Amino acid sequence: MQITANNTDRKTWLKIPKETDFPIQNIPFGVFLTRDDVITIGTRIGDYAIDLGALHQLGYFEGIPLTDDIFLQDTLNDFIADGRKTWRAVRNRIAEIFDVKHEKLQKNEEHQKVILFTMNEVEMQLPVQVGDYTDFYSSEEHARNVGEMFRGADNALMPNWLHIPVAYHGRSSSIIPSGIPIRRPQGQKLPNGSDTPIFGPSRNLDFELEMAFITTAANHLGEPIPVEDAEDHIFGLVLFNDWSARDIQKWEYVPLGPFLGKNFASTISPWIVTLDALEPFRTEGPKPTTEQLPYLQSKGKKTFDIHLQVAIQPEGKKETIVSNSNFKYLYWNMSQQLAHHTVNGCSVNSGDMMGSGTISGSTKDSYGSMLELSWNGEKPLKLKEGGDRKFIQDKDTVILRGHCQDKNVRIGFGECSTKVLPSFKSK
Amino acid sequence: MQITANNTDRKTWLKIPKETDFPIQNIPFGVFLTRDDVITIGTRIGDYAIDLGALHQLGYFEGIPLTDDIFLQDTLNDFIADGRKTWRAVRNRIAEIFDVKHEKLQKNEEHQKVILFTMNEVEMQLPVQVGDYTDFYSSEEHARNVGEMFRGADNALMPNWLHIPVAYHGRSSSIIPSGIPIRRPQGQKLPNGSDTPIFGPSRNLDFELEMAFITTAANHLGEPIPVEDAEDHIFGLVLFNDWSARDIQKWEYVPLGPFLGKNFASTISPWIVTLDALEPFRTEGPKPTTEQLPYLQSKGKKTFDIHLQVAIQPEGKKETIVSNSNFKYLYWNMSQQLAHHTVNGCSVNSGDMMGSGTISGSTKDSYGSMLELSWNGEKPLKLKEGGDRKFIQDKDTVILRGHCQDKNVRIGFGECSTKVLPSFKSK
């Protein structure tokens, strides 16, 4: 099936801003609470949120095999489990419905009243129930920066790093959508020069600029996914802020990896942008510098040229952009990540989420965390307004943004925004 | 509410074996497929599986506030979310219904026909949909043994171990019930003396003797659970075999912890034994050898005296018992684990699972893994039948068992049994 939704000469009859992340060529999927307090699955064009449950009930998806309630759910998991052919058919149909050449809904104001919302009328929810969340560590620049800080430049990269898309399991329960504030985590920290930990709020609260992909039901327990088939099982991508408490993490993480330093919160952007929508922005990643085992060898353009940005906004002040990076910098691509994840037979379900790891570029203004940007606090960042930052302070809002752009079209992710509140106080 | 289900003078009108793990004082909860191919929630007395959905429909839970479909579900998650008061009321009622002094069901053969199954008529399922699974590392003997093997006796215990109930996130998707065979995982391994990994089946496949507790919905994101309240949020315990591929794990785990070396499979026993049922077997754990931070200080009998056993059975041969251990050996108890897990605000949901970590005792016949029992393959174990074992071979079945026993009653967990099949071959 062709991806006709991507046609760049297509225009919508909806009034939308010129510079939107969500032209009619995007058509992402999300879940929102409507002005009538109903949860529905929807898409977005410009600043309109579109109720797919209502569209379906009114017969606009006729001819596409969908169960009656597929869009009347709290999450996209079941729709994603329907597979790529269905996602593509639905996305193509939505593009037709809102195409200026298509008159059915355009001329039906009664239908428009129940189908269309403005973005400020809806409240975005988590788009999927994340069964399992895995976080990779696939940016060589990030791994080298962190390694250099903690082990010196000569031992920056661990011996396995160029052979394995290193990853660890994260916590699904604390994944939240953009817009939900978080509390500064508390925990054990080891003061410099001491061998006895103290308890208190994290002083080194950090963001991590990541993206994450959402999978469909991909394999049975015991059966690996070949690297060349991996993309068939990837629904789409979101922006992902993998909040980190560096001081808690540093003391706890040996030998079993990060735990409380990470699992207090992770924020995702609420609209899942499909791989189909990103198709025009395919590109090659970095060339492998070490021979890879056959199950990891991927060919062709297996990553995407996605511009990424991080801004910090102190309360009541202007924001400062502190990083500009790109998804294509990642050494390991999604196909390699999924092939590796399943090579031992591990099963992957619809709605599982896989984070990329912090995406840092090679220049200092493209690092994806405060740990790197301030070089572990040695070089505080100057904000336009609101003082310096070694790490994130209470009442700061951290905003991730991402988009693809060529001369024809801009496909974006919107924002992944989170405000930090002071630590929990027991009554 | 009193736990009347535990009365040790209670006898059932069902015919049950004398030495069963499941006397009328146990009343665990599970999910099974019946002879009519229906999935239902149930309990077990002796070798009878009891359909709680049918009991409820026939009015036996009258007076207890339960939704109509609470037992007609694929998982116990919603029932567990109803909270301790409800679990206790249901368990007490079941004990009454099957008490020899209670005649209603005892005299109603029609009802018995739809409520009672023999265990060989049913197929046990996963009792919960595990949202998040965390594995602790709470046996000091196990941590010291592993540390000694890999870092020498002087550095056996990491500096954080006595201060933190160390843990990592595991993979929920590959948790399976007892009885489901697994395939030997494949992956990257680093041959001795080489700096280049090779690919192939794990040669060091290992079990880990653990127990795991299942939580109810415990807290909101951002709000810690105090150590003294933690047990209110624990539904019950299962046996847990945290399968491990030591060669894969060794190469991959630095710096972010175990991943493919663990996530190919974890097996649980299918009946969740409630904390209420274990109440008579409360005991104190080891005394802390280091001052603990206040949020981890627990008082009183916060663990349970549960005898644990591991057997290896080669195909067509007699089994050999290779380990005898006890849950009470764990240095960190469940209350401390849950308080630690949430002290940073991490949220815990109904059906989440927390593994104890390998439970090793201080003697060589009480170690909870082949890694320790064979001392990393240096001292192969002699089986009664089927040769020696450094690690687990294809077609071996590994069986965990656990029970509590005093002069009045035996409360057991049944078996957690898994057969190992050869590695997956692609077509």
Image: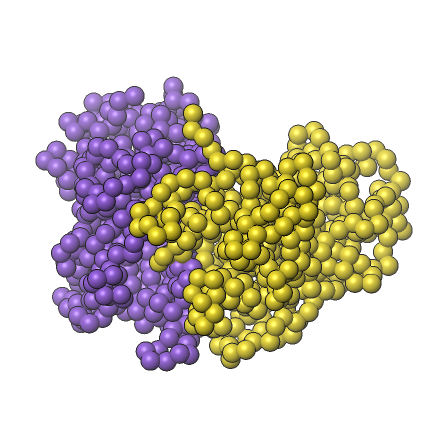
Chain colours: A purple, B yellow
Which residue is located at x 40 percent, y 64 percent?
Answer: A254
| Residue, far left | A407
Residue located 46% across and 27% down the image = A67
Q: Is residue A387 left or right of residue B96?
A: left
Point out residue B59 in the picture as x, y percentages from the top left corner. Answer: 76, 42
The percent coordinates of residue B414 (x first, y second) are 70, 48
Res A37 visible: no
Q: Which quadrant holds the C terminus of chain B?
A: top left
Is residue B31 positioned above or below B83 on the image?
above
* Residue A413, position as x, y percentages in the image: 25, 44
Q: Residue at x 87, y 46 (%)?
A: B13
Q: Is residue A1 visible?
A: yes
Corner quadrant of residue B103? top right
Name the residue nearer the viewer: B258 or A1. Answer: B258
Q: Which corner quadrant of the image does residue B285 belong to?
A: bottom right
Give the left or right position of residue A259, taking residue B410 as reference: left
